Image (spheres, coloured by chain):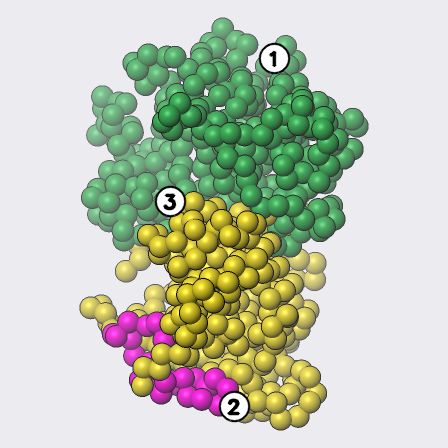
Chain colours: A yellow, B green
Amino acid sequence: MIAYASIWTCASWRSGVAEVAPLLSVRDLRVGFRTERGVVRAVDGVSFDLEVGSTLGIVGESGSGKSVTAKTLMNLLPSYADVSGSITFDGRDVRAMARSRERHFWGVEMTMVFQDPMTSLNPVKRIGQQIGECLTVHLGRSRSEARAEALDLLDRVGIPEPAKRLRQYPHELSGGLRQRVVIAMALACGPRLLIADEPTTALDVTVQKHILDLLDDLRRERGMSMILITHDLGVVKGRADDIMVMYGGRTMEQADTATLFGEMRHPYTEALLETIPRIDAPSHSRLVPIPGKPPDPIDVPPGCPFAPRCRACTDACLVDQPALHAHGSTHLCACHAPVGTPEGAAARSTNVAAGRTPAGLDLAVFAGAQDRPGDDASPDVSSRSGGPDDSGPVS
Amino acid sequence: MAGRGTVHLRDLSVYDDVLLRVEHLVQEFPVGRGKVVHAVSDVSLDVRAGETLGIVGESGCGKSTTARALVQLPPPTSGRVLLDPGTDREVDLVGLSGRALRAVRPRLQMIFQDPISSLNPRRTVRDIVGEGPAIWSKSASGPHQQARIDELLVAVGIDPEVAAVRMPHEFSGGQCQRISIARAVVMDPEILICDEPVSALDVSVQAQILNLLEDMKARYGLTLVFISHDLSVVRNVSDRVAVMYLGKLCEVGNADAIYERPAHPYTRVLLASAPEPAPTVDPSDAAIGDEIPSPIDPPSGCRFRTRCPRATELCAAEEPVMQAVPGDDDHFVACHFPSV
């Protein structure tokens, strides 16, 4: 949090222009869900700024808190959620708006596109009615005006024969077309921030590329800001200005895209990138696994949430939760032994020498996996067994 | 695309280790009013012992239908599915009676996409893994069977003592997929058919499961048929890759050959559309329409022609036939205008 005062509140760090207030500013956001088993810590102290016209990529696996963060912004959490922290949109307090039940903010200035286009459309209403509804309810358009605008929107998102589509039902469209309809609805009221939560996960690769390109074009054309949530680092690589990597409800690493990929600091970010099969690697390349399983959000152990799965784990990681530290002017990382630092190299060589990490992770699971050149952590173990260590049941 | 023809099948007089051979497989489903979904249309494939065949394509291309037709779930409309082709043990699964089919089924086992819904939620994990041996062996409770179940559970990284008392919902998705693998391999199959086995898993768990499949393949001498929509995953696990589109084969061949020298325009589209496009193709290759034609009324000639940047009148008139790619040993393409 100390680091934020110096870096992220200075909104001008990228452009060099002084005193441009960010469109969206989130500080120390915490979200807990009260359940029978205890409180689920879904988001645990997340902060970020989003400037006008830029894209923030939030990357994480299921359970990392990325979707809950988005739903908190959209005021979509159930009543048993406990939220703390501040959310400021263009100088206004979003959480106060939620309490006053402001109607024309969500869906107008801030909108969201969900993962599954089938479940976010009403199956018994025609496409034209659904798009027109946003326009009549929020902007007070007449039905004929709404129809004309809906036609324009469908055309703009690249739907062929828009007049015919207005009369159709969602089930008559393919997945890609449905997602385009959902995007058209999100754009209907001219939002300033679009949150896209895994917008292409349910779609084929060929369609995925078109949808991501479309979102990028629309953002540029309208000067809109965007939050792109995904589990795939490859998706945000070419499209986000800044990237935030989340794990266990916490921010692990945050930087502009070039810095994140060029000077990766967090072992989790590195592991995420290494574990994905590369399309240009020969067949039967041994993959670098991330052993173990994601943390239990109820019984949160002290220390770093990634420590049990981390190759660079140190004794400190098990007891002391690392804070976000600045590495350079635009780069934050929460790690005691970051990649590419003397501490990180020392932690890895200590663990390799011991054959296991202080958290008890047996480094034999990495046997046979190809390390990237220059990675000094390759354990010299010849057995191929690669025993996974997530053999215990989830509690 | 099209892909008629069988030139890509291995010559049985040269290769004596072809374990599975699919000839002219057709799977059609009636949808009423005389209409028919042409899910798989004249697909021929073969797999040698110890090989991994990857089948890749978009949703609706027929890859899962093909996999299920191999185990006769349901039996295909026409075509042949041969085990041990060309030998005196040759058996055609299509048209086998219930009893005879049952006797052959342990040789082919399957792993499904959703690990949690494919396990019975009301039985312990040990019972789930032990059910196959219990049905097939009179001495199911014998020490030999129990040792085998323990061995498999340990091999996939599940503690046998824990498995004896826990139900599937007490395990994570990755662990449930490990249990599915144990359940399939405990029957000592020759062929393991994996239908999108890692699509429902987080990326951090995906690599664990893929590595485990490679280990199990080596340890138990398995032959794999691996279905996925993820091009990178398919390249990683496969020796040979088949690209499918709308019920037809586009391109078949050695995995590295297909990814290094893609010959079919559709393969190039897939490679260029990946979030991080393959370096062997031009990213502009991805610029095609994203509407797949209906399998009820597929296009004439080459089925890919409606989206293909190179399509001509010839493609509408005549279905291309599978042909060898010049200069490559094991690389075949069904296209009138391949990039070679």
State left or right for residue A19 relative to residue B185: right
Q: Mark 1 near mark 2, Cβ–Cβ under 8 Å?
A: no
Confirm whether the magenta stretch covers residue A181.
no
Residue A389 placement (x, y as % from top left)? 41, 54
Residue at which label 2 appears? A2
- Amino acid type indicated by mark 1: Leu
Q: Secondary structure at mark 3?
A: loop
Read off the magenta span: A71-99
Q: Secondary structure at mark 2?
A: helix
- Who is closer to the viewer here, B108 or B296? B296
- Amino acid type indicated by mark 3: Asp
Residue at far top of view: B88
Q: Residue at x 56, y 43 (%)?
A: B291
Evaluate whether residue B329 shows in this view: yes
Q: Residue at x 31, y 75 (%)?
A: A32
Evaluate whether residue A195 shows in this view: no
Question: Residue A217, relative to residue A119: is it above or below?
Answer: below
Quadrant in the picture for residue A74: bottom left
**Alpha carbon separation for disc pair 1 and 2:** 71 Å
Q: Residue at x 40, y 32 (%)?
A: B110
Residue A101 placement (x, y as % from top left)? 32, 82
Residue at which label 1 appears? B12
State left or right for residue A374 relative to residue A243: right
Residues behind callouts 1 and 3 on a single chain: yes
Residue B272 placement (x, y as % from top left)? 67, 48
**Tag 2, which chain?**
A
Residue at which label 3 appears? B114
Residues behind callouts 2 and 3 on a single chain: no
